[in-house]
Image (cartoon, helix red, strand yellow):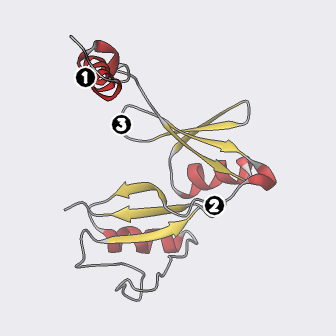
Amino acid sequence: MNIGGDEFAAVRRSQWHNDERSNMFKDTKAFSGFSVDDVEQAKRFYGETLGIEVSDENGILELTIAGERPVIAYPKGDDHEPASFTILNFPVDDVEEAVDALVERGIEFERYEGFDQDDKGIMRGNGPDIAWFRDPAGNILSVIKPD
């Protein structure tokens, strides 16, 4: 069989995808992480303000939220740049109730140009109800009512 370069590469890719190596991450217990500029401030915010179980090992926070996998927050100090996207979405039954409770804890909600948000910062009627806020490091979080 005489297979040219491109055809040979296609056959090898096909073998790779049919090989068990293509499933190398199928059963891995991946986890997510994000950076913060001040670990102690993040620990207080996530633990006390949001009520999440937080552990600290060697300066890295582990957030234990519902589900099987932890989320880590790691220090970057002055090199930290806040995420420009939502890093954590917290599903709730009632977004307005969650917003009111978070406002009572001193959290301010974000307003985004081009999004139809009410006076509390809740976007309704364009997908799931959602409201965005920031952690002390400037990372974006949300409360969301899944459809």
Task: Report the residue marked by disc 1.
Answer: 14
Q: Report the amino acid beneath label 1.
A: Ser
Tell me the number on the disc at residue 82: 2
Report whether 101 appears left or right of 91.
right
> In the displayed structure, would residue 37 be above or below residue 98?
above
In the rendered image, the quadrant that contains the C terminus is bottom left
| Image position, residue 16 (x, y; %) | 31, 19
Secondary structure category for the residue under label 1:
helix
Q: Which of pointers 3 and 2 lies earlier in the amino acid sequence?
A: 3
How far apart are the alpha carbons under marks 2 and 1?
40 Å
> What residue is shown at x 34% (from left), y 70% (from top)?
130
Q: Residue furthest front?
A: 2
| Image position, residue 86 (x, y; %) | 47, 60
Residue placed under numbered mark 3 in the picture: 67
| Mark 2 or mark 1: whose residue is earlier in sequence | 1
Q: Quadrant of residue 26?
A: top left
Q: Left or right: 35 with respect to 52?
A: right
Mark 3 and mark 1 lie on one chain; the one further toward the N terminus is 1
- Within-10-Å neighbours for mark 1: few <14, some 14–19, many 20+: few
- In the image, residue 54 lies at what x, y percent? 57, 40
Query: Label 3 crowding class (10 Å Cα cut-off): few <14, some 14-19, many 20+?
Result: few
Observer-nearest of 111 and 99:
111
